[in-house]
Image: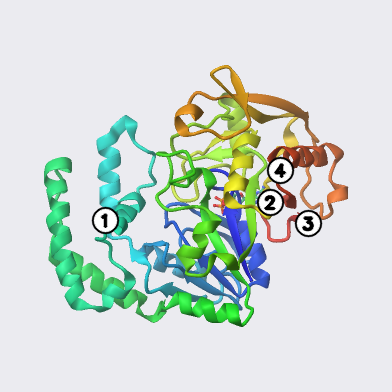
Amino acid sequence: MVKAVVGANWGDEGKGKITDMLAENADIIVRFQGGANAGHTIVNDYGRFALHTLPSGVFYNHTTSIIGNGVALDIPKLFNEIQEVIKGGVPKPKILISDRAQIVMPYHILFDEYEEERLGKASFGSTKSGIAPFYSDKYAKIGFQVSELFDEDILEDKVSRICEKKNVMLEHLYRKPLLKPKEILDTLHEYRDMVAPYVADVSSFLDKALKENKTILLEGQLGTLKDPDHGIYPMVTSSSTLAAYGAIGAGIPPYEIKQVITVCKAYSSAVGAGAFVSEIFGDEADELRKRGGDKGEFGATTGRPRRVGWFDCVASKYGCRMQGATDVAFTVLDVLGYLDEIPVCVGYEIDGEVTTEFPVTAKLEKAKPVLKTLPGWKSDIRGIKEYDKLPENCRKYIEFVEEQIGFPIKMVSNGPGRDEIIYR
Ligand code: GDP
């Protein structure tokens, strides 16, 4: 049985918490896309952890954590993270790395920095983790696959070809120091020795696991609106954030994904540039930002303040539809308990017309939010375990959102902890 845990919004919906929670009853957790650019924050019995590359299932003894072929594998970052987790008292996790995963090279990170610097004000707000240059190289067929680390002839030949190409850009476009083939080869050898104990034929491993009726979780990074095809292009990430891609990025048949748990946050937050229709500003935004998440809305990777706004029914309905949501997990609802009234974005006004269908980016830039205001519940809902015990206005908020998005809210998260969850 395969379940995907994915985001309906711009990321930071709380997928890490939901995955950590569901991992208790899972055997295998797979990261299938993205890299160390976004982070999941997890609060559990061992403490508070910011994971970037490791799946959020590493905290259990019984699980296997997998880095799938679709991931942008930053080897030094992965190793630091493993050390951090062990230092935090967590038992040494069982980790497998796909022999088909590709490697983020130090020059990908440099190119990311140089490009953002070159773009100046027009920059994408990249986390400068090398993700866009990495995926560009993957599709330009000049990436390094983990399997290639073990073939010296391939490595040497590829390194010299890559340096030739990259150095033209470094010299003429960026005017930065050139790459030295010997240094790159040394790095690759170091990486080979680091990953060697973990490398596996992941799709065979998962095939066997499926035959043995194991439970597999696919953990997505970011959310629908950051998908390169279906998101707010070009202000998107470079790998697909959709559950459908989970089949490819892990190496399993698409029909095995039986449940798509789509995590949707009770208000909006986003990092980086791009249209954000229900965004709020000033004191109102500062207040929500300060109270958001478990320690305020600040990026887990960069510490940057996140942009915040009211819940967006248009974006979330689309976000759930593109994921193919079977279950919506509605998260971080406790944070809204301070508000007298809670505005919700129920439509977009574009060129004088109101729509509830999420538009392409050029139209999105022109959209103005149509807001409906719901009464707040003015109380702390943390600690409540049953749906019926939630304040009436809180239930009304959930039910209103559910009707607007058209997908069933089956879980409500009312705190960052593993057990702070209400099933419906
Ligand atoms: P992810 O990338 O989707 O895993 O999300 P992040 O980890 O970046 O952001 C979610 C933040 O909200 C983290 O700081 C979590 O600890 C926190 N969080 C998750 N669920 C809840 C919740 O129900 N209530 C509160 N207050 N915080 C939550």
Q: Residues within 10 Å of mark 1 (few under 14, many from 20)?
A: few
Comparing labels 1 and 2, the label whose residue is closer to the camera: 1
User: Tag 4 or tag 2, which sits nearer the N-term?
Assistant: 2
Quadrant of the image containing the N terminus: bottom right
Pinpoint residue 251: horizontal percent, then vertical percent: 47, 69
Give me the C-alpha separation between circle 4 and circle 1: 40 Å
In front: mark 3 or mark 4?
4
- Residue at image position (45%, 62%) is 53
Corner quadrant of residue 64: bottom right
Sequence order check, earlier mark of 3 and 4: 4
Q: Is residue 230 left or right of residue 105?
A: right
Residue 415 in picture, x, y percent from top left: 70, 51
Disc sitting over residue 328 in the figure: 2
Q: Is residue 74 left or right of residue 83?
A: left
The residue indicated by pointer 4 is 406
Instruction: Report which residue position mark 1 lands on.
Output: 140
Residue 423 numbered tag: 3
From the viewer's side, name the closer residue of 325 and 45: 325
Q: CA distance from mark 2 to mark 4?
A: 10 Å
What residue is at 53 percent from the left and 69 percent from the top? 253
Across and down, in percent, residue 276 comes to 52, 32
Element under disc 2: strand
Residue lying at 63% horizontally and 73% vertically, measured from the top left: 215
Q: Are marks 3 and 4 in contact (CB under 8 Å)?
A: no
Q: Residues within 10 Å of mark 4 (few under 14, many from 20)?
A: some
Task: Compare marks 1 and 2 and give the one earlier in the sequence.
Answer: 1
Query: What colouring does the structure picture have?
Result: rainbow
Of the residues tagged 2 and 3, which is closer to the observer?
A: 2
The residue type indicated by label 3 comes to Tyr
